Image (spheres, helix red, strand yellow):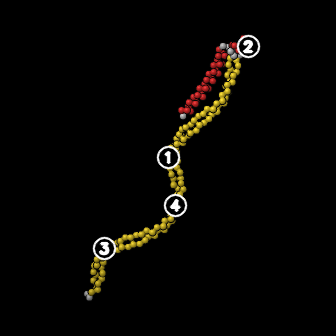
Amino acid sequence: MGDFFSKLSKFIFLIAILGIFAYGGYFYGQMVLQESLFKVSIPINQNVSLELNQIVSFPLKTQIDVPIEKTIRIQKIIPITSSIPIKTQIKVPMNLSTGVVYIDVPIETVFPFSTNFTLDENIFISENVSVPIDLFLDVPINKTLEIPISSIVDVNIPIPDWMNKENF
């Protein structure tokens, strides 16, 4: 960026010098009251090169909606192996000659079981997912700009005494 300001200041200095010469020539001619002036056109044809090498950062805050439509198939065999402890008493009728008598019979055991559970399902997902974005976006600018300057500066310069026609 310093190179840019250096070239810009050189260009401004060149224009200032040309302006000073132009104004100085005019002022000088007016001061000495010369009647004859000759016109000089100074062409300026130059390219000013501006180099931009900078990172521009700006905030980006938005929300993006992402549609999701997907079918997911789940096929799985899930083995289940377990045991159920049983501890209870049951009353069992018993026929005796005197009649029916109920006897308490204790049961204490573990009942093992093993099975497979089959899962075969299609799950359809149709959803819009919102994704918030809040960040600073850095954009590098690396560019050299060539600016052509083409102009003509007209300057009225007084004729010096040695060139005056009355002196010949």
Q: Are marks 2 and 4 in contact (CB under 8 Å)?
A: no
Element at label 3: strand
Query: Which comes sooner in the sequence, label 3 or label 2?
Result: 3
Q: Residues within 10 Å of mark 2 (few under 14, many from 20)?
A: few
Q: Which residue is mark 1?
A: 134
Element at label 2: helix
Residue 159 rendering spot, x and y as whole percentages: 69, 16
138 and 94: which is toward the camera = 138
Q: Nearer the viewer, mark 2 or mark 4?
A: 2
Q: Are marks 3 and 1 in contact (CB under 8 Å)?
A: no
Res. 96 mark: none
Q: Are marks 3 and 4 in contact (CB under 8 Å)?
A: no
Res. 87 mark: 3
Q: Quadrant of the N terminus?
A: top right
* Amino acid type assigned to the residue bearing label 1 in the image: Asp
Res. 125 mark: 4
Q: Nearer the viewer, mark 2 or mark 1?
A: 2
Q: Which residue is mark 2?
A: 165
28 relative to 136 in the view: left or right: right
Query: Which comes sooner in the sequence, label 3 or label 1?
Result: 3
User: Would you identify the image quadrant in which residue 166 lies?
Assistant: top right
CA gap between label 3 and label 1 equals 63 Å
CA gap between label 3 and label 4 equals 47 Å
113 and 108: which is toward the camera = 113
Vertical arrangement, residue 145 with respect to residue 154, above or below: below
CA gap between label 4 and label 1 equals 27 Å
* Amino acid type assigned to the residue bearing label 2 in the image: Lys
